[in-house]
């Protein structure tokens, strides 16, 4: 996320990168780890604190905000986040691939007990960026428009403030200039720039 972070810094934001081990930890362990990092970096911040998460990171932002009161909470941007789970996890559920990706990946499906389905809806201002990417490799796995891993419709949340679809694959969203520009637009103004996308 360092290129993305650099673009936010250049726009005037102080940026703290929060990392976690998605391969070896379950969602509760990841939440504990990121909660510690957020306390250490942001406990004494007086200005607004915005949150931006890509993919699983977006789910962890939602989990953190569900479990913690942030009195100076600003805005939230979720990029390529499987808010409704992803059928890719359903498709590969009993394969060695998903098992190799760890206990959290195994809980990213679309069933009622999946990790995304355990999260409450937003009480905060949230903008969602979905990616759209043509790929023959995965088209038989994910029906409809998707970013190569997460269906566009699976990124949506009831109660979201704004929503935009950008031409980007799931992995490349972190490096995409337009994704960064739209994130900055939302953090500054509470909406995406739908006119010049």
Image: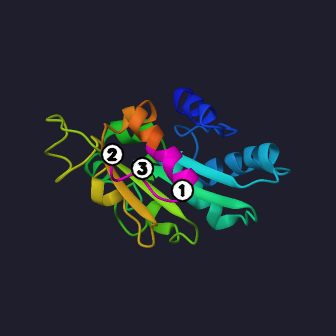
Q: Is residue 157 magenta?
A: no
Horizontal side, residue 101 vs residue 125: left or right = left
Badge number at residue 106: 3
Q: Which residue is mark 2?
A: 196
Q: CA distance from mark 1 to mark 2?
A: 15 Å
Which of the two discs, 2 and 3, labels the residue nearer the N terminus?
3
Nearer the observer, 141 or 96: 141
Is there any visible trace of residue 182 in the rendered image?
yes
Is the C-beta separation of discs 2 and 3 under 8 Å?
Answer: no
Question: What's the image's color scheme?
Answer: rainbow
Is there any visible trace of residue 54 in the rendered image?
no
Crowding around mark 1 (Cα neighbors within 10 Å: few <14, some 14 to 19, many 20+) is few
Horizontal side, residue 117 vs residue 87: left or right = right
Is 113 rendered above or below residue 4?
A: below
Helix, strand or loop status at disc 3: helix
Is 105 rendered above or below residue 2?
A: below
Which of the two discs, 1 and 2, labels the residue nearer the N terminus?
1
Q: Position of residue 162 (x, y in %)?
A: 42, 62
First to last magenta residue range: 182-197
């Amino acid at each position: 996320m360092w290129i993305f972070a650099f673009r936010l810094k250049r726009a005037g934001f102080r940026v703290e990168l929060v990392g976690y081990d998605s391969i070896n930890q379950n969602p509760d362990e990841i939440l504990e780890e990121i909660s510690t990092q957020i306390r250490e970096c942001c406990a004494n911040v007086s200005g607004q604190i915005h949150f931006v998460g890509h993919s699983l990171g977006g789910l962890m932002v939602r989990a953190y905000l569900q479990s913690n009161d942030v009195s100076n909470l600003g805005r939230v941007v979720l990029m390529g986040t499987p808010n409704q789970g992803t059928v890719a996890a359903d498709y590969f559920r009993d394969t060695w691939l998903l098992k190799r990706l760890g206990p959290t990946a195994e809980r990213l499906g679309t069933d009622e007990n999946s990790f995304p389905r355990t999260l409450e809806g937003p009480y905060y201002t949230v903008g969602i960026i979905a990616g759209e990417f043509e790929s023959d490799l995965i088209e038989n796995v994910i029906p409809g428009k998707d970013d190569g891993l997460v269906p566009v419709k699976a990124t949506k949340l009831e109660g979201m403030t704004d929503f935009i679809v950008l031409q980007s694959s799931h992995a490349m969203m972190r490096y995409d200039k337009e994704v960064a520009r739209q994130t900055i637009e939302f953090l500054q103004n509470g909406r995406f720039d739908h006119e010049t996308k």
